[in-house]
Amino acid sequence: MSTPVNAGLFNVTGRIACVTGASSGIGRAIAAALAHAGARVVGLGRRAAALEAWRAETGGETTALAADLSDPGAMIEVAARAAKPYGAPDILINAAGVNNREAASDVTLEGWQATLDLNLSTPFFLARALVPAMQVKGWGRIINIASLQTTRAFPGGIAYGASKAGLGQLTRAMAEAWSRHGITANALAPGFFPTELTSPVFDNPDLAARNAAQTCIGRNGVLSDLIGPALFFCSPASDYVTGQVLFVDGGFTAK
């Protein structure tokens, strides 16, 4: 006997989401999708004007919060600010990131540390600041934005790749630490999508075409391709899924 599909499986209505990097790219797309799906969304980023533009375009119950996410030591304060508009967040999307695309011989200690701070340390310390309130509710979702470089080495990506590989392990460690409290931790690893971070790729039509040809599907991603997987991880549909890295890459890593 088949089990009927629960219409509420992907329901995020009334949930409170905190999305870093909401001013552009993947963070902006996911923040907008959550708002359109009925969540109350606090969008975080460093560019106030871009955040306000996202909020005006998105509508719904949204708040723009300009914050310096480059300092992991400030995350307790950032978490407190993020909880003011609607209450403590149930959902955290760690989408803010930086990719300097430098050869190994050009990486400075300062640049290395800045990359690891924003891409790896801030996701942990922000999550840890938000987890106690999730524990009280007995429900929470942490979604990290990983990368093809979580498992692959690309030219000019030594610092970025190290941070994203670490983020994959951080996701598993978060799941081990917090899933028993009803808080799942998973990661989306996008393939090649047109964003500010990937503009050097998409500004080169030949390179973009070569990347598309390396996928099983035969094209690069568009931001809407990430919405379904993101809503899956944010909703009750993924109740028994934790500690996973889902590659949304058109089959790039399958070849």
Image (tube, rainbow, N blue to C red):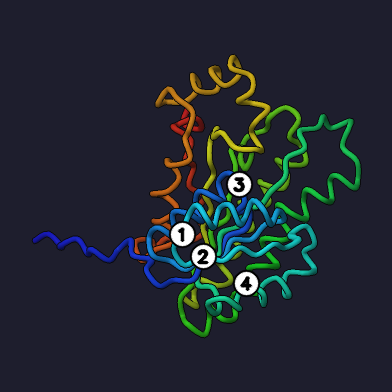
Relative height, residue 218 to residue 45 (above, below): above
What's the residue at 69%, 62% (across, down)? 66
Type of residue at label 1? Gly
The numbered mark, 4 or 1, whose residue comes first in the sequence reads: 1
Q: Mark 4 — residue?
A: 82
Give the SS element for disc 1.
Answer: loop
Give the SS element for disc 2.
Answer: strand
Question: Which marked residue is nearer to the observer: mark 2 or mark 3?
Answer: 2
The numbered mark, 2 or 3, whose residue comes first in the sequence reads: 3
Give the SS element for disc 4.
Answer: helix
Between the C-alphas of marks 2 and 3, the distance is 15 Å
Q: Are marks 2 and 1 in contact (CB under 8 Å)?
A: yes
Observer able to see residue 172: no
The numbered mark, 3 or 4, whose residue comes first in the sequence reads: 3
Type of residue at label 3? Ser
Across and down, in percent, residue 24 comes to: 60, 46
Question: Which marked residue is nearer to the observer: mark 1 or mark 3?
Answer: 1
Could you say which disc has been placed on residue 76 in the image?
Answer: none
The numbered mark, 1 or 3, whose residue comes first in the sequence reads: 3
